[in-house]
Amino acid sequence: MFNLPFKLTSKPLRYLIFIIILLLIIPSFFSFINQETNSFSEFSPGIIEEPADGITIVSIQGFHFEGKDSIKKPARLVAFDPVGNVLWVHNGSSVGARWFYDVDPLPNGNILVLATAPDETLIYELNANEGIINWIHKLPFVDTHDVDLISKDQLLIANMRNYNPSTNLNDDRLLIYNLTTQSVEWEWLFRDHGFKKSGGGRYSDDWTHVNDVDLIHDKYVMASVRNFDQVILIDISTKDIVLTLGSDGDHNTLSEQHNPQYIPSTNGNQYPYDPLIAATILTADSENDRIVEYEYRENEWHLTWELVGNFSWPRDADRLPNGNTLIVDSLNHRVIEVTPYGKIIWEVHSPWGPYDAERISSGDEGHGYSIQTSHDMGVSGRYQLQGENSKIENDISFEQSLSKFFDETPLEQPVNAFSTRWSHVAPWIYPVWMSSWDFARSVLAIIILLIWISIETFRRIK
């Protein structure tokens, strides 16, 4: 019979295990008692080297667990003035919103807001100066991350998590919905256009996770199919996919990207512009923790601009009319504006998970402006994020330390995969006052406690 080399239930060992568990959880206790009162609800400016060109609207995604909203992680919209001060905060609970996603500046100066509630999608217009709702429309869609107002009464919608258990088919789709007639005028189903049932996410749940949709030149629809690691361009009239950036599992190109921006290059091209000859797409390459710009020319894609650094799951990147790029760095809980060379010149901090940011003066993702590509500006290349504030730059997380410890070892690849997954899942679980180290220590304490209890139980049964 197998015998343990020492008696695990002896009093000295019990005391030692108890002390280890205590030492692991004490830092979390002090983090809790030392948190600033209501610090989770505060927004603040960071680096402000240059005032922003107008108001910046940021959507704070929010967090819910089993239908209960988190008091410390509510869904909100926030308006910042040019120097990062808060103008107003709109709390989604006022309309039953549990998650905020896309926000779009409208031609009238107001904002089109997208939010989700249980079993429905909320679309409404918000007064940009005061944060007051002008009108609201509800659609029976379970989950939607992006919607664009493409005419006075037409919405272009990316509808996901649309599995139909009665038919055993996933109806994830893109559609044009008429607000006046309350009818679907155009529909495009992913399952009808070559997307494999075995690809992407779980077919019976979050299969495509299509998280962004845009109308391009009134002729094409661009969509970000996150779980298939690709951005596609669809001809509205024929419904054919005419251009694809990335492919399922090709994580060197894109890995679960968010919110791509289509930029019609002005360099040597004549309008009307044909994206099938040349096109540029800027996107937050989320799981790769970088911002990338790809240019399509001579029938292939070229990586023309890449920004790397201390990003943590960026989920939005918009090129601004001044040539800078506005970036949502979600799990660093901030929005930054960087120069073409990667220097931070404007920054605001949010207490929890920003998703989308728009500069009101630029319109919806700069539409209607002559937005420049890196090729246009002559700055193509790979750049490192510069000008980090000391807090983010010096705050080495548990997952970063874990990756560095196993760097250049046989375990480097699996540990990096674990660290990436940990960094994108754990922050949704632990409270805002708890650090990544506090959470890792607490998890280890729980594991030790469970092992201890299991051994004690086994010995008693024996």
Image (cartoon, rainbow, N blue to C red):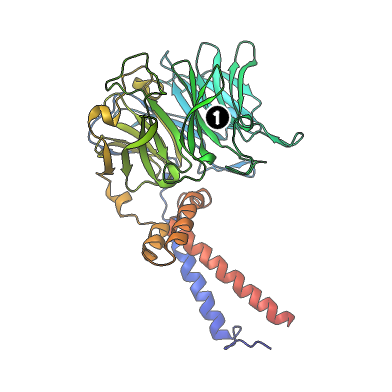
Which residue appears farthest toward the right when viewing the image? 166
Q: Residue at x 59, y 86 (%)?
A: 10
Image quadrant where residue 373 sits: top left
* Left or right: where 342 falls relative to 261: left
What amino acid does circle 1 point to?
Ala
Asked if residue 10 is positioned above or below residue 20 in the image, the reply reads: below
User: Which of the two residues, 84 or 307, is positioned nearer the viewer here?
Assistant: 307
Which residue appears farthest toward the front when viewing the image? 298
Quarter holding the C terminus is bottom right
Image quadrant where residue 115 sits: top right
x and y percentages locating residue 419 in the rendered image: 45, 57
x and y percentages locating residue 385 in the rendered image: 28, 44
Asked if residue 45 is positioned above or below residue 446 in the image, the reply reads: above
Kindly state the secondary structure of the residue where label 1 is placed. Answer: strand
x and y percentages locating residue 216 in the rendered image: 45, 20
User: Which of the two residues, 436 or 313, is positioned nearer the viewer here?
Assistant: 313
Q: Residue at x 51, y 50 (%)?
A: 425
Q: Residue at x 60, y 14 (%)?
A: 178
